[in-house]
Amino acid sequence: MSRPKRYSLAIELTAFCNQKCGYCYNDWRDAPGDVGSLPREELLSLVDKALTEVDFDHVTLTGGEPFARPEIFEILEIVQRHGKRALIISNGGVISESQAARLATFDPFFVQVTLNGPSRELHEEHVGKDCFEPTLEGIRLLRKYGVAVSGCIVITRKNARVVSEILELWRSLGATEVALSRFSPAGYAANQTAELLPSRSELIEALRQAEPFGAAGMRLQVTMPVPACVVEQADFPHLNFSSCPIGTEMQEFALGPKGELRHCTLHADSIGDARVQSFASLVESDAVMHYRDVTPEFCQPCPLKTSCMGGCGAAGLAVLGEHGLDPFVAQHVDDAFAAKLKAARATTSAQTPFVPASRLRRSKALERT
């Protein structure tokens, strides 16, 4: 019997991260010590099991910060043995020269690194103090040893109007591909919805600034779903737009640091425990196969509903408490949510906190086994 074929498996090597990003989608961001990471032998065994049971096109190594886990090179060896390649998502800040040199021998597709400002001040406003220069140094080391670096910008309310300046920085660093990752308030980031969620006009301004870079040959991918009811994608012909792939052969599953398999890195709830269940059964489970059966009520009249899905379902679940409309859309069409968002943005006191629905219950991702 043939193995199920899927696009990718994102392996979260560790819950530890040296940065404190406000836009972090890891549900454990506030308490990484409660999650930790799988023991070495168990992690290596699970990676081998995954690639044996499912025909993944490639794997993505992520975290937390994947280069904080010394077993990253052992995992790359397993991936290579299965005839696959990896891409790596890193903040770049802990990459040493020896790691960069060794990584080059594995020929990864690329290492994706995020810069959220053209200068130290704006970048560190997003990720924490003393992170800008270490990230730049990590990028330089990777390029020194011939490792491809793909850029990323998390587009927020704070940086949407300076995207062209950030792209100029990426161009000066030699990047030819940059992901435009519209802020999605899933996981920990649900707490930062009021502070970071861009409006429609702010996102359009960011895309308007990015369009000339795409026209000049830079490959720009809008990685988070941007529903057509909010942004007319045809206005930006040199940008590539994505939609939610859950429930399709293009899905990237997430293997969490406790062995749980999830719909994607942004979803907090587990499909099942990959330590005791087969990956083949999990990727073909009812939870996956019927994920796209549910679309938000607002989307029902739309002919694009089955492909668009109302945006990011993980963000809808984290902020609104249901597999519903993406808060990026809801802020413009849901009067109650818009009022809550406005109130949270109008004060810096604790009297009007923005409390996402997911914080009113204990996250399954943090349950101890």
Image: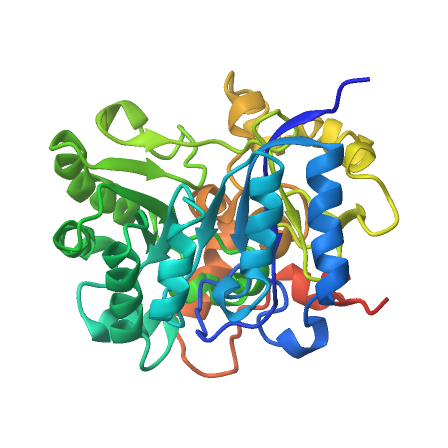
Q: Is residue 337 left or right of residue 115?
A: right
Vertical order, 185 against 128 (above or below): above
Q: Position of residue 52 (x, y in %)?
A: 73, 35
Q: Position of residue 358 (x, y in %)?
A: 67, 61
For residue 356, which quarter of the picture? bottom right
Residue found at x 50% / y 39%: 85
Residue found at x 41% / y 65%: 99
Q: Can residue 200 be seen here?
A: no
Q: Position of residue 115 (x, y in %)?
A: 29, 60
For residue 253, which quarter of the picture? top right
Q: Can residue 39 be seen here?
A: yes
Residue found at x 41% / y 36%: 226
Q: Quadrant of the N terminus?
A: top right
Vertical order, 188 against 242 (above or below): below
Vertical order, 345 against 324 (above or below): below
Which one is in front, 227 or 272? Answer: 272
Q: Is residue 165 left or right of residue 84?
A: left
For residue 157, which quarter of the picture? bottom left
